[in-house]
Image (cartoon, rainbow, N blue to C red):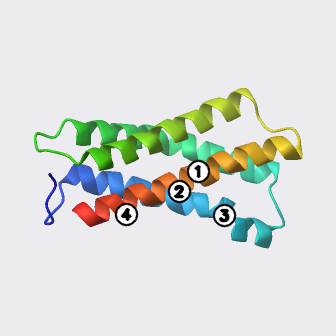
Amino acid sequence: MPKKGKPASEIVALREWLISLGDLLQAVSLDSLEERGGWDWTLFEEVLGRVEQITPSFQAALTDYLVLPEDRSGEIVVALLAVDRLSTAYTYWTRLFPPRQADESMFVLSLLHDLSDKVERAIQLLDNNY
């Protein structure tokens, strides 16, 4: 089981990635969208491009974490895999089926809000355990 103390570099890398993604997802929070005046194609491209750019580095950090010799919390592993699965699904589906109408944009936003929730949960678990 993880212990409080100095976290391994792999955990630090995961946390930094999660914070970076969380900051990015703030651009599509309900408050930010209200300030911006809504969802638009420019924001879609910006967020999608950035998620695509940083997902491989998260996956590399996740792999490094999963092969650490010490025990890991199953809850943390599940949370990190949920982030990976949702960020990958988001980029895959939105590249295949980019939103063309308002209702399709709502689907994309729901994926991003779910991803934001998963990111927050993973950060919380890492903070509580390391």
Mark 4 to mark 1 CA distance (whole Å): 15 Å
Q: Are marks 1 and 3 in contact (CB under 8 Å)?
A: no
Residue type, mark 2 in image: Asp
Q: Are marks 2 and 1 in contact (CB under 8 Å)?
A: yes
Q: Which residue is mark 2?
A: 117
Q: Is residue 64 left or right of residue 31?
A: left
Based on the displayed image, in which of its 4 quarters is residue 111 positioned?
A: top right
Q: Which residue is mark 3?
A: 29
Q: Secondary structure at mark 2?
A: helix
Q: Secondary structure at mark 1?
A: helix
Q: Which badge, 1 or 3, is on the more N-terminal residue?
A: 3
Q: Secondary structure at mark 3?
A: loop
Of all residues, the one furthest to the left in this rendering is 69
Mark 4 to mark 2 CA distance (whole Å): 11 Å
Task: Please name the residue shown 23% across and 61% down the image.
Answer: 129
Q: Which residue is mark 4?
A: 124
Residue type, mark 4 in image: Gln
Residue type, mark 1 in image: Asp
Task: Please name the residue shown 78% across and 48% down the image.
Answer: 106
Badge 3 crowding class, 10 Å Cα cut-off, few under 14, some 14 to 19, many 20 or more, is some
Q: Which of the two residues, 82 or 16, is positioned nearer the viewer here?
A: 82
